[in-house]
Image (cartoon, rainbow, N blue to C red):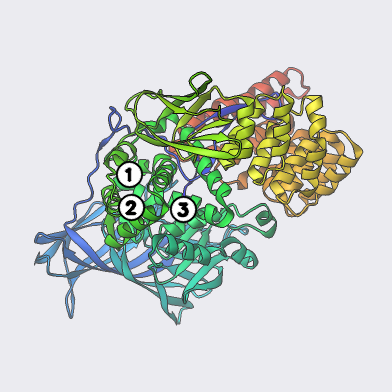
Amino acid sequence: MQNIRLRHLFIFRVSRRLKGLIVIPVIAFSPYILTAQSTDEAGSDRGVYQAAAEKVNDLVHTKLEARFDYDKSYLLGKAWLTLKPHFYNTDSLILDAKGMEVKAVGIVTKTVTKPLKYIYDGKQIRIKLDKTYKSTDQYKVYIDYVAKPNDLEGGGSEAIRDDKGLYFINPKGEEKDKPTQVWTQGETESTSVWLPTIDKPNQKSTQEFFLVVPSKYVTLSNGLLLQQQKNADGTRTDYWKMDLPHAPYLFFIGIGDYAVVKDTYKGKEVSYYVEKEYAGVARKIFGNTPEMIQFFEKITGVSYPWQKYAQMTARDYVSGAMENTTATLHQEGAQQDSRQLLDGNVWEGTIAHELFHHWFGDYVTAKSWSNLTVNESFANLAQLLWAEYKYGKDAGDAENYKNLQEYLGRPEEARKPLVRYYYKDREDMFDLVSYQKGGRILNMLRNYLGEEAFYKGLNLYLTSNKFGNAEAHQLRLALEEVSGRDLNWFFNQWYFGAGHPKLSVDYSYSDGGRTVSVHVKQTQEGNIFILPVAIDLYFGKDRKRQQVWVDKKDQVFTFRNETKPDLVNFDGDKILLCEKKETGKTLANYIHQYTAAGTYMDRREAIEGCAGLQDSTRAVELLKTALRDRYQELRILALHSVNLKNDSIKQAMETTIFYLSKSDPDPKVKAEALMALSLYDKPIYKDLIQSSVNDSSYSVAGAALRSLNELDKQLGYEEARKLSSLKAKDKLAEAICHVFAENSREEDLDYVVNWYNGLPLGQLKVENANMIAYYAVQVENTGAVKKAVDALVQFRNEIPSAYKKDLYPFINNVLLKAIANQKISRKNMSSDGHAIQEQIDYINSKIE
């Protein structure tokens, strides 16, 4: 599962253009993860021991006949489950079945179905079988039931906002701009909301689904569509068969009015189910999938093990994406129009993530949620591996850096081991540790073992546990078998231990002793880490690598050399999962690091180092060089780093910034350059900025509009009004809303509120709450004030329970109270105090 989620790292800042109201907590909305709960294995808040589910009975095969009541949002189901005792004889069966109406339970013989006695408590069906069965016996039970997901009291987590399992989207067609869809979400254990089963990850079953749906809709499920039968009542029955075993949380049903765009890979169907509006760009969104399959086959040495691969989009999805076997489901954010795609396919990493799960997660599945790392850490690593393969090492290193920063940005996460047998709720496992930290740990392991041994070890792990379950222990044993190296030390500290190293690194050179000294201290609390580290000494362009083991709290490594190196580069491959503080590094070292060491992280560190040394012309020249860096993200970093408030630096950068704003091949770089260009108040630049508001890239057009508004408020507003009548998304729509907010005219409020209400939960929603609050303060019409306040309240009410403790106070005590206080201060100065008091009362009535 790919979790696009809120981060709890609050960075308060004042909006650049809406000053004087309140501060914005920025909560990074990252591919994938974050949990509010701390599950310290060694602390008092660690929860209880979570054993793998006991296997009394094994699922063998699942057959389902399902009809759908769109008026009531019910699934009318008949299920036949084939099972066998796992080892011990048994005369009973417990099935997970949440919130259902159970009509009948029976045992199926060759000729008849005989009723069975059962007890149902709303969560499980406890069934007394007709006799005692042995482990060599198979038996089949029948359940007639109605699934009522909307009657179930919902739960959920940060990863998955709701756990109803089965979702009817706009089932009665009452929302004109939203399609009617039905889809399921099984992870963690919500398949049992719509299908009686043993809802545990250590169960595996083949399946047959017969789905009766309105004939105007298409369906998607696991395996292959073998037959379609038209019915007399205007429905159609689709028969889907999955003849390979997989876990119940991966069972899937999707129904809706989709365009189906098909590719193939080695004769297997690779298909993309998108809303019809996106049929023309489906291959631009998902079209790298066949190449991804080929790449993942190559590195694992395991051919894609399933019958087909389909990907479907969903409205109002409760997570980011889900690796349902052969039928991945993506949130609607995957659907991007042609202008959005010019700024880059923001969903490509997620596509790689979910696909890799079909080896790590679907083919070999975590035995229990405690070992979620063998699913999610690999899927997280896949994003790096794909970026590195497809777009080069800089792209892979950038992905690694992003994920590392997301993990380090939540210091409390360091309390959690990667493998956790103690936790309060299984949903707690879906966090920065299982995803971002786990992916970085695997990347270190890839570096330590070498790619050949690492991938051969993965092949052994997969083939030894295929269509079964595994834990981190099996992964270690496979890597040890291939490499011949003992890895207990690695797994003990990174998988079963918590935290990460915090390193203080100092460099010096003794002329008299002709000695390079590297002083390394581990400053973290708790255990000392064992770290294989490469220390590179640079003499001009020549590199001399020293391989050392950092394994003490305080160590000094010395290397005899006749000349002083131009650079001592600790962690030469920039692979360590750590916090690092370096001292003794000079400007000359940073410059040499940028030009000679050359990796993404080397150049990034050099840019960041020079950013704080801009009183030196050499540092400024390095930043100017970095504006032309080969990798777009570093060009943007350089743009953000140069001090354009300094007139001489501003003048030195002018030609390069103008070039970037006009000619850079990457739209996001061009956009950032256009923002910087607004600081140069020259007619030639204003003309370029104004013409760029019609650029085909939303990022470029949005940046141009904001820059134009900085230069000419009236012209900026006029352009925003024009653009608001056209199709606008992403950065352009956001820019239009900010220009409107600065002017705070009532006639523009509907546009702003509609845009804000349509944003998915995430960073933009939080950041732009300040804009909505500002608008509410500025407008005088009571109806307009209520509309803006209602948008904030709607956001508050959508917040998953895991985030309420942080975001509720922000919305209630910061935003809404700030609006009320501003209104109070204006009341005495207004001729219409009664209207303002009505507004104040309304705002206060919404504060919880």
> Element under label 2?
loop
Tell me if I can see residue 366 in this picture. Answer: yes
Judging by the rendered image, the residue that carries numbered circle 2 is: 189
Q: Nearer the viewer, residue 345 or 583?
A: 583
Cα distance in 3D space between marks 3 and 2: 25 Å
Judging by the rendered image, the residue that carries numbered circle 1 is: 426
Q: Nearer the viewer, residue 308 or 302?
A: 302
Q: Position of residue 445 (x, y in %)?
A: 38, 45
Judging by the rendered image, the residue that carries numbered circle 3 is: 382
Residue shown at the point (34%, 38%) measured from the top left: 494
Q: Position of residue 627 (x, y in %)?
A: 71, 39
> Element under label 3?
helix
Quadrant of residue 416 within the rendered picture: top left
Q: Position of residue 750 (x, y in %)?
A: 71, 44
Residue shown at the point (51%, 69%) measured from the top left: 271
Cα distance in 3D space between marks 1 and 2: 9 Å
Q: Please tell me which of labels 1 and 2 falls first in the chain.
A: 2
Residue shown at the point (9%, 61%) measured from the top left: 89
Q: Amino acid at mark 3?
A: Ala
Q: Is residue 54 above or below residue 711?
A: below
Q: Amino acid at mark 2?
A: Glu
